[in-house]
Image: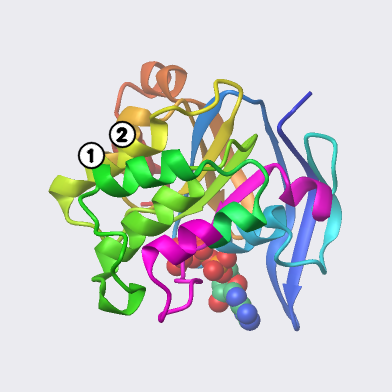
């Protein structure tokens, strides 16, 4: 069974059609980059998959479930905006996730927070953008989910820390998990990607295995992106 199966997805914001008849099939056990120009619909697609946008057209299935309570139990979603209360400490967020998600591991989260060098007693309001991203990634990746949806997870962190963050994302990943990551930092993400989905104007333009695409086009995925969107 596909981890994600989408047929003819449409999503309108008022009169504007942000997703326009999008089809996508993604198997489990892969890390897939969701790539495309600003405004092509990446965040909108991830929000539909996460169950955060409920008004849409077409068929969406996550391990056989339409987005809703059953899919949310197996999907770990990391939105692009900060979604945790400013006044909360990292420790409080860990306890909140633990209460909220049956598949959450406190030990794993504490381990990742330590790995990132963050002090769990710090309030989120006192963290830099990059530190906050690290904390949010630690929380999202400490669920034993079947699908991880990560929207621009490393945009705020410095180049040297990106590798560490990517290692944290792939570390201890359940083998059958699908990770769908939207990003503009293709060069940084490329080493961990198994597949890519290129989007344009609310549709999927091209999908494929990164090794196959590199062989077929004779360039890196980063270079292929520049070629496709030139
Ligand atoms: N709440 C909203 N109301 C109206 N239009 C919206 C809303 N959210 C997104 N859009 C529009 O929908 C389109 C897709 O937006 P979306 O955020 O999904 O793109 P994106 O690919 O994630 O962009 P970026 O790479 O810049 O983050 C854009 O044209 C955007 O202006």
* Mark 1 close to ligand 1, CB under 8 Å: no
Q: Quadrant of ligand 1?
A: bottom right
Does the residue at mark 2 contact the one at mark 1 (Cβ under 8 Å)?
Answer: yes
Q: Is residue 192 visible?
A: yes
- Image coordinates of residue 37 in percent, x first then y, are 44, 59
Q: Is 86 placed left or right of 61 in the picture?
A: left
From the viewer's perspective, is 175 left or right of 19? left
**Residue in the picture at 36% in, 57% down:** 135
Where in the figure is residue 184, as x and y percent of width and height?
36, 53
Q: Was residue 71 drawn as part of the magenta stretch in this picture?
A: yes
User: Which residue: 69% across, 61% down?
Assistant: 19
What segment is highlighted magenta in the picture? 68-95
Q: Secondary structure at mark 2?
A: helix
* Nearer-the-camera pick, 110 or 202: 110
The structure residue drawn at horizontal position 45% and vertical position 71%, both measured from the top left corner, is 82
Q: Is 133 inside the magenta-drawn segment? A: no
Instruction: Write the residue at 70% across / 52% down.
Output: 49
* Most distant residue in the left direction: 160
Q: CA distance from mark 2 to mark 1?
A: 6 Å
Residue 216, above or below 228: above
Residue 211, placed above or below residue 79: above
In the picture provided, is 69 more to the left or to the right than 174?
A: right
Report the number of numbered marks.
2
Tell me the tag on residue 125: none
Would you call the spot at circle 1 few (<14 residues within 10 Å), some (14-19), or many (20 or more)?
some
Image quadrant holding the N terminus, namely: top right
Q: How is the protein colored in the picture?
A: rainbow
Q: Which mark is residue 167?
A: 2
Q: Which residue is mark 1?
A: 163
């Amino acid at each position: 069974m596909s981890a994600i199966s989408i047929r003819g997805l449409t999503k309108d914001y008022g009169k504007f059609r942000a997703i326009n008849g999008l089809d996508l099939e993604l198997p489990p056990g892969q890390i897939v980059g969701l790539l495309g120009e600003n405004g092509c619909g990446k965040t909108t697609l991830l929000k539909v998959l996460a169950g955060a946008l409920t008004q849409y057209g077409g068929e969406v299935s996550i391990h056989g479930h339409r987005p809703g309570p059953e899919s949310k139990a197996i999907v770990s979603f990391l939105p692009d905006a900060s979604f945790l209360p400013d006044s909360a400490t990292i420790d409080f967020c860990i306890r909140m996730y633990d209460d909220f998600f049956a598949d959450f591991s406190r030990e794993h989260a504490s381990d990742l927070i330590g790995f990132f060098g963050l002090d769990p007693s710090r309030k989120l309001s006192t963290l830099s953008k990059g530190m906050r991203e690290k904390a949010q990634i630690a929380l999202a990746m400490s669920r034993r989910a079947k699908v991880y949806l990560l929207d621009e997870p490393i945009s705020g962190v410095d180049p040297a820390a990106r590798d560490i963050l990517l290692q944290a994302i792939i570390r201890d990943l359940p083998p059958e998990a699908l990770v769908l990551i939207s990003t503009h930092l293709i060069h940084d993400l490329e080493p961990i990607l198994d597949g890519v989905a290129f989007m344009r104007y609310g549709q999927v333009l091209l999908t494929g295995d990164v090794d196959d695409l590199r062989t077929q086009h004779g360039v890196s995925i980063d270079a292929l992106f520049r070629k496709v969107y030139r």
